[in-house]
Image: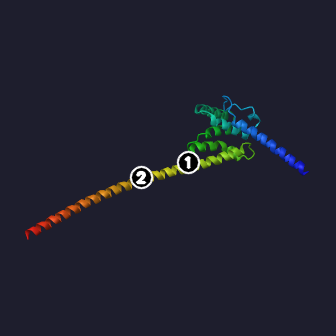
Amino acid sequence: MRTLAAGLAAVTLLGGCAQLREITESITREPARESARDPAPVESALSPGDRALAYYARLRRLPAAELTREREQARRALAANGSDENRMRYALALSDSIDSSAEAARVIELVDPIARRREAPLHGLAVTLRSLLVDLQVAHRERAELLRERGDWQRERTESQRERADLQRDRADLQRKLDSLKALEKSLSDRDGAQR
């Protein structure tokens, strides 16, 4: 009985490894001039989550002009058919180059309906993407706050440098006046000494 259980476990693991290898190869394979919207033959046999990841892997290899076209096609596909897969594809196409909290919020808005439904095939990916994007929004806000604080600090530093320069100028003026008074006192004491 133990041998049978061990054999079944080994076959299951090997089957899982083969499927994992197949998924990995489909994601990393560089197809000849394959567009990101044309599913690979292996991709159609994959789960929705694996198809989404394969799509994202191909998006990452696209030149900027093709990526822009792909975003537009994903947007149109979502407008025509609001399926979870189209929603995720558009979110992934947008998430490839997020530069601000507003862009992250837009992608979160796209994946949120999928993330709320536990039974959705893309639920795990949507939750993960949403979590990463929320973290990205926090990082954008913290960066903006740090930049604001840096600007404040630089302004304060410039102001204190100005004040220091003013103080040094005032000190030099006072030193000149003191030197003038000492010279005047000396000349007066020399004159008083010469008159006696």
In x, y percent, where is residue 167?
A: 32, 58
- In three-dimensional space, the C-alpha distance between marks 2 and 1, rounded to whole angstroms, equals 22 Å
Identity of the residue furthest to the bottom in this view:
196
Q: Which residue is mark 2?
A: 155
Identity of the residue furthest to the right in this view:
1
Q: Give the amino acid at mark 2.
A: Arg
Q: Quadrant of the C terminus?
A: bottom left
Q: How many marks?
A: 2
Residue 93 in which image quadrant: top right
Specify few, some or many for label 1: CA neighbours under 10 Å numbering under 14, 14-19, or 20 or more.
some
Compared across the picture, whether 161 is left or right of 128 comes to: left
Q: Give the amino acid at mark 1.
A: His
Up the image or down, 14 lies above or below 163; here it is: above
Compared across the picture, whether 102 is left or right of 118 comes to: left
Residue 82 at least partly seen: no
Residue 42 at least partly seen: yes
In x, y percent, where is residue 127?
A: 68, 47
Up the image or down, 149 lies above or below 16; here it is: below
- Name the residue rendered at 72%, 42% in the picture: 122
Specify few, some or many for label 2: CA neighbours under 10 Å numbering under 14, 14-19, or 20 or more.
few
For the residues bearing labels 2 and 1, Cβ distance under 8 angstroms = no
In x, y percent, where is residue 177?
A: 22, 61
Query: Mark on residue 163?
Result: none
Compared across the picture, whether 141 is left or right of 59 comes to: left
Up the image or down, 100 lies above or below 36; here it is: below
Sequence-wise, the earlier of marks 2 and 1 is 1
In x, y percent, where is residue 148?
A: 48, 51
Q: Which residue is mark 1?
A: 140
Asked which secondary structure carries label 1, the reply is: helix
97 or 73: nearer the viewer: 97
Asked which secondary structure carries label 2, the reply is: helix
111 or 58: nearer the viewer: 58
